[in-house]
Amino acid sequence: MAKYRKKPVVIEAIQWDGTTESSHEIIKFADVIWHCNHNHMTICTLEGNMKASIGDYIIKGVQGEFYPCKPDIFESTYELVIE
């Protein structure tokens, strides 16, 4: 069986900390948020609506799509790019 490596891709992301300021930043970043309360926000993704919890990252993918990602998955998959 062949083995494959994920191509290096630079993405944009914001971590939601549950504060009003953070929520406003994410809403400006991702115009696909259609519901937000103190515990979760609902994001329209290519796969349908997904819930993001406090601490989750909101990622803008390579085709401009948005989706939530749990912190442990994000931290094992991505590293900060210093420009």
Image (spheres, rainbow, N blue to C red):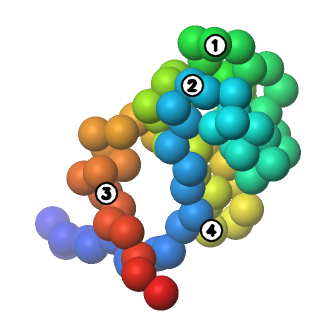
Q: Say above or below: 58 vs 23.
A: below
Q: Is residue 11 left or right of residue 42?
A: left
Badge 3 is on which residue? 77
Query: For this rendering, which residue is in front, 19 or 67?
Result: 19
Q: Give the CA distance from mark 1 to mark 4.
A: 29 Å
Q: Give the CA distance from mark 2 to mark 3.
A: 23 Å
Q: Earlier in the sequence, mark 3 or mark 1?
A: 1
SS at circle 2: loop
Q: Position of residue 81 (x, y in %)?
A: 41, 77
Crowdedness near tag 2: few (<14), some (14–19) or many (≥20) residues, C-alpha within 10 Å: some
Q: Give the CA distance from mark 2 to mark 1.
A: 6 Å
Crowdedness near tag 1: few (<14), some (14–19) or many (≥20) residues, C-alpha within 10 Å: few
Residue 25, quarter of the rendered image: top right
Q: Earlier in the sequence, mark 4 or mark 3?
A: 4
Badge 1 is on which residue? 38
Amino acid type, residue under disc 1 in the picture = His
Decide: marks 2, 1 in contact (CB < 8 A)? yes
At horizontal 75% and vertical 52% (from top left) the residue drawn is 29
SS at circle 3: helix
Q: Give the CA distance from mark 2 to mark 4.
A: 26 Å
Badge 2 is on which residue? 18
Mark 1 against mark 4, which lies toward the viewer? 1
Residue 55, quarter of the rendered image: top left
Amino acid type, residue under disc 3 in the picture = Thr
Labels in figure, total: 4
Q: Position of residue 23 (x, y in %)?
A: 69, 33
The label number, if any, that marks residue 62 in the structure image: 4
Mark 2 against mark 4, which lies toward the viewer? 2
Q: Earlier in the sequence, mark 2 or mark 3?
A: 2
